[in-house]
Image (cartoon, rainbow, N blue to C red):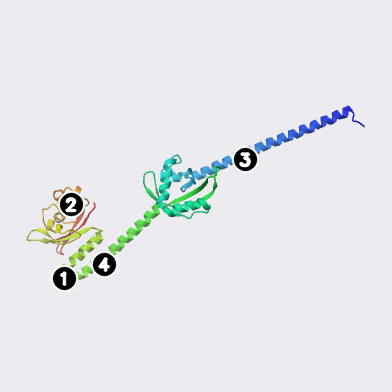
Amino acid sequence: MKDSPKKAQRDYEQQLREMNDALLVSSVRQHELAEQAKKAEGALAHSGEQLRRAFEEAPIPVIVHSEDGEVLQISRSWTKLTGYTIEDKSIFQTWLTRAYGYGGDDVRGAVKKLFESGDGMQPAEFDIVTVSGERRVWSFTASSPGVLRDGRRFIVGMAEDDTDRKRAERALRESEERLSQELAATERLQDISSQLIREDNIDALYDQILDAAIGIMRADMARMQILDEGEDALRLLAWRGFEPEFGKIFELKGRNAKTSCSLARQLGHRVVVPDVETDDFIAPTLEDYQKTGIRAVQSTPLFARDGQLVGMISTHWRKP
């Protein structure tokens, strides 16, 4: 039995309503998905911005660069310590090469291995050169977390500036060396003192006294003079570190000679001349100092127990 025209019309209308409802549901779903995608994109952008800001504000130097050397991002700490910014790409490439070069084959090899294997890099110490030309010591480590969208591998490197620590360690070593030298010189002076008390072969002690003076003062040269009352002058008794010509030039210096020892005799106390080339008193005899390699000098009067001058001991340096 065939359906009546009215029933067929009703069925057709019902199908249209169902299709319309389906399209409406689909449209609503698409709108919801679009909103979700938009929110996700916004959240991702926000997360990326937070990550970028966290990277820039990192308290230690951080860098991201690709395997071909392109610098992708650096932290402000990196810029603060080196002077380089992300805009200095052309300069920065040269700097990276120099930095790795200064580190030697071990650092260069470690970076190459990092790109090839993806394993973390062990901390490596090397010098870096800042924009101003200052050389600083960094402990550098890095990892290769993956590849960029264009297929290039990249690394994230982090550094610790060890310059101040290295300087402190060097200063400590130098201080310990100075203390060791001064202790040795003091022990030598104690030995000399005991020999002076015995008055055994005093002439043989002159060189030992000058060696001790050079050690204590960290000087290059030293001399000892004795007061020649007959000549009213300081006569050269012994010297260390000078060429023989020195003995002729400074063999005898009168009370009014323009030398550090004569001035110390006049004043009755130690005289220090940091740079003979800028000292007005020594100017008339500057040529003598230059001939013998003296650039700085101190002269200390030696007095007997009754306060009378008996001689002079001086130490000299080749640099101001």
User: CB atoms at circles 3 and 4 under 8 Å apart?
Assistant: no
Q: Earlier in the sequence, mark 4 or mark 1?
A: 4
Kindly tell me whether residue 103 is visible in this rendering.
yes
Q: Nearer the viewer, mark 3 or mark 1?
A: 3
Could you tell me the amino acid type at mark 1? Asn
Residue on which the image places disc 4: 187
Residue 310 coordinates in the image, percent (x, y): 13, 62
On screen, residue 82 versus residue 308, left or right, reads: right
Name the residue located 31 percent from the left edge and 62 percent from the top edge.
Answer: 179
Q: Amino acid at mark 2?
A: Gln
Query: Disc 1 to disc 2, how far (Cα)?
Result: 34 Å
Give the x, y percent position of residue 11: 84, 31
Judging from the image, what secondary structure is the residue with disc 4 in?
Answer: helix
Residue 23 image position (x, y, % from top left): 74, 33
Q: Nearer the viewer, residue 143 or 69?
A: 69
**Residue at the (22%, 63%) spot, across then down:** 211
Q: Give the class, few, some or many, for how many residues have Cα within 10 Å of label 2's Cα (few <14, many ≥20).
A: few
4 or 1: mark nearer the eye: 1
Mark 3–mark 1 distance (CA, rounded to whole Å):
96 Å
| Residue 20 relative to residue 150: left or right | right
How far apart marks 3 and 4 lie (CA) works out to: 79 Å
Label 1 packing within 10 angstroms: few (<14), some (14-19), many (20+): few
Residue to which mark 3 is pinned? 40
Sooner in the amino-acid sequence: mark 1 or mark 2: 1
Q: Which residue is mark 2?
A: 290
Q: Tag 4: residue type? A: Glu
User: Pointer 1: what residue?
Assistant: 201
Nearer-N-terminus badge (3/2) = 3
Q: CA distance from mark 4 to mark 1?
A: 19 Å
